[in-house]
Image: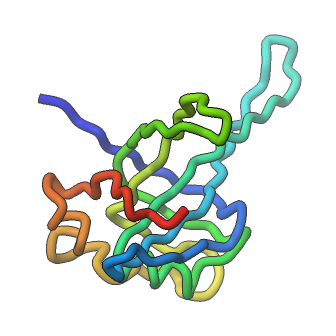
Amino acid sequence: MSVNKVILIGNLGKDPEVRYTANGRAVARFPVATSEVWNDAEGNRQERTEWHNIIVWGKQGETCGQYLAKGRQAYIEGSIRTRSYDDKNGQKRYVTEIIAQRVRFLGGGGGGRIAPEADGEGHGETAAAGGGQAPFDDDIPF
């Protein structure tokens, strides 16, 4: 048995970018920052911020594009994916992303509203791809 589950609560680093694949599927992409604060051995306050690349498919992605904005806090539940690509110089690059199955809008207008497809029907289009998770799609327009 194995589990690939991520839960994040953080703030958007920029407005969601919503694009559409050649077959009309919406896909939203945005960064989310999470921060950790602690005191080191000398009692000095330390802080570390981690940035996460979020991908949201289908109607839920469109809704994120409508209601989320830079600075807004969100709850993200999904799975981790790492994919590779060749850059302009032919170097293999890797990117780690969170494929969101559930997004809840926090802080500000909306009062913790859950995006459509977030809680029902097997997560919309992501479930149709198999295993409840969206595979990497070569049609991703970015």
Pinpoint residue 23: horizontal percent, then vertical percent.
31, 78
Quarter placement of the C terminus: bottom right
State whether residue 91 is above or below residue 49: above
Pick whichever, 138 or 4, lies toward us: 138
Pinpoint residue 18: horizontal percent, then vertical percent.
53, 76
Look at 16% across and 69% down and name the residue there: 122
Q: How is the rendered protein coloured?
A: rainbow
Does 88 sit left or right of 141 as displayed? right
Does 2 sit left or right of 109 as displayed? left
State whether residue 48 is above or below residue 101: above
Pick whichever, 139 or 46, lies toward us: 139
Quarter placement of the N terminus: top left
Q: For residue 2, which quarter of the picture?
A: top left
State whether residue 127 is above or below residue 81: below
State whether residue 88 is above or below residue 71: above
Does 32 sit left or right of 59 as displayed? right
Pinpoint residue 48: horizontal percent, then vertical percent.
74, 35
Look at 44% across and 71% down and name the residue there: 27
Look at 43% across and 39% down and name the residue there: 83
As drawn, which residue projects farthest toward the top?
41
Look at 71% across and 67% down and name the residue there: 14
Q: For residue 119, which quarter of the picture?
A: bottom left
Pick whichever, 66 or 39, lies toward us: 66
Pinpoint residue 106: horizontal percent, then vertical percent.
55, 73
Q: How many marks?
A: 0
